[in-house]
Structures are given as structure tokens and as C-alpha cells.
């Protein structure tokens, strides 16, 4: 299971298959990480620095995080893609598109075939967020994810 949690200036990735329940997360930031709660990760409950430092201690890298760099990720289900937009500072609305991850729905699952981020936005974890956004949606829909795109395959490998 892959989940993407985003709040304020932090995006958190969780890969359940890597989680070995060493519980560094629930002891490091107990208000943020609580097994049994839904969702079990709530980024509104603690300062970003506390969350970041706790995730840093996850021994299996089931939890990882990046700063959002004022880029928002949205799922555009009508067009089978997730999209990254800059955030307009004044209005808070989505601004310029700076990346997208495309998939098609097949009988076998959701095939991710293309992931791209604007060159000036590379190195910020945006592509990873895009892939996770699609993967999370597929898993919630009960569909298998088939990463044909080499970048998506790398993000999702175990
Ligand atoms: S610290 Fe990492 S491996 Fe341990 S329970 Fe939390 S998410 Fe899982």
C-alpha cells in the first residue's frame, strides 16, 4: 500500500510493504502517527520539524518526506493523470503546470506510462509525488498498478 500525505510545506510518502513496525514514528511524534486511527498519519498535529526529524529515524524508509516547494499535486481523473501546479502566492489557487504523470486503465490494472517534470522543477520530489498520487488512487480503487514508465517503476520498487 502506498499513501501520500500533504499538508503545508511537507509531503510524506508511506510504503506499507517496507514498514516493519519498529515504531520509531509513533514514539517520535505520537500526535502525528497513530496506528488504528484513520488516517493514521495526520500532519496537522505537530510542527513540520518534529515530523521531519521523526521520519528521518524510520529504520526501513517506509516513511520518507520532501518539502512541497509551493507545488500542489492534483489527481485529474477525467484525463487519467496526476498534475503538479505551482501555487499562486496571493490567491492560493493552482498556477502554472510543472509536471504530470499519465496512466491508462486496463483490465489488468492502471498502467503508468509517462512521468515528466519541468526541468526547472527537478530534484524536488515532484515526480515521486505524482507517481504516489496515481498509485494511491489505483489502490483505493482496488486496481493493480503497472509501472511501464521507468521512473514510476523505480519509485515503486521494493
Ligand atoms: S518507524 Fe517506519 S518502519 Fe517503524 S513503524 Fe513507523 S513507518 Fe513503520
Image: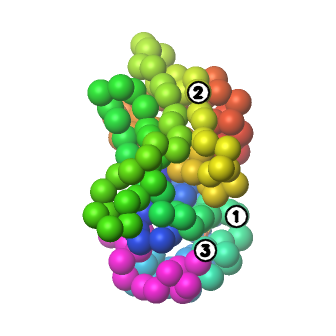
Residue 12, image x, y percentages:
52, 63
Which residue shows up at 45% across the image and 75% down it? 33
Viewer-side label of 2, 1: 2
Please name the residue that numbered disc 1 is placed on. 60
Picture residue at 44% right of the left edge, 46% below the top: 96
In the image, which residues are magenta? 37-52
Circle 2 residue? 114
Residue 138 versus residue 28 in the image, above or below: above
Looking at the image, tell me whether mark 2 or mark 1 is earlier in sequence order: 1
Q: CA distance from mark 1 to mark 3?
A: 10 Å
According to the picture, the residue beneath numbered tag 3 turns out to be: 55
The reply to whether callout 2 and callout 1 are in contact (CB within 8 Å) is: no
Which quadrant of the frame does ligand 1 lie within?
A: bottom right
Q: Is residue 140 left or right of residue 71?
A: left
| Residue at 51% over, 37% down | 100
Q: Is residue 58 visible?
A: yes
C-alpha distance separating marks 3 and 2: 29 Å
- In this rendering, the answer to whether 93 lies above or below 23 is above
The answer to whether the residue bearing label 1 lies less than 8 angstroms from the nearest atom of ligand 1 is yes
Callout 1 crowding tier (Cα within 10 Å): few <14, some 14–19, many ≥20? some
Q: Secondary structure at mark 2?
A: strand
Q: Which of labels 1 and 3 is toward the front? A: 3
Q: Position of residue 7 (x, y in %)?
A: 40, 68
The residue drawn where x is 46% and y is 86% is 47
The extreme top residue here reads 107
Amino acid at each position: 500500500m502506498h499513501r501520500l500525505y500533504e499538508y503545508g510545506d511537507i509531503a510524506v510518502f508511506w510504503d506499507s510493504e517496507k514498514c516493519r513496525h519498529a515504531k520509531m514514528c509513533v514514539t517520535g511524534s505520537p500526535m502525528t502517527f497513530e496506528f488504528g486511527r484513520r488516517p493514521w498519519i495526520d500532519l496537522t498535529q505537530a510542527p513540520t520539524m518534529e515530523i521531519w526529524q521523526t521520519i528521518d529515524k524510520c529504520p526501513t524508509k517506509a516513511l520518507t518526506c520532501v518539502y512541497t516547494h509551493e507545488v500542489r499535486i492534483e489527481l485529474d481523473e477525467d484525463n487519467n493523470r496526476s498534475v503538479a501546479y505551482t501555487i499562486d502566492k496571493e490567491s492560493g489557487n493552482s498556477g502554472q503546470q510543472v509536471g504530470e504523470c499519465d496512466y491508462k486503465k486496463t483490465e489488468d490494472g492502471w498502467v503508468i506510462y509517462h512521468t515528466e517534470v519541468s526541468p526547472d522543477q527537478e530534484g524536488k520530489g515532484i515526480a515521486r509525488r505524482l507517481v504516489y498520487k496515481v498509485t494511491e488512487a489505483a489502490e483505493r480503487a482496488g486496481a493493480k498498478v503497472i509501472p511501464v514508465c521507468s521512473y514510476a517503476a523505480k519509485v515503486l520498487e521494493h
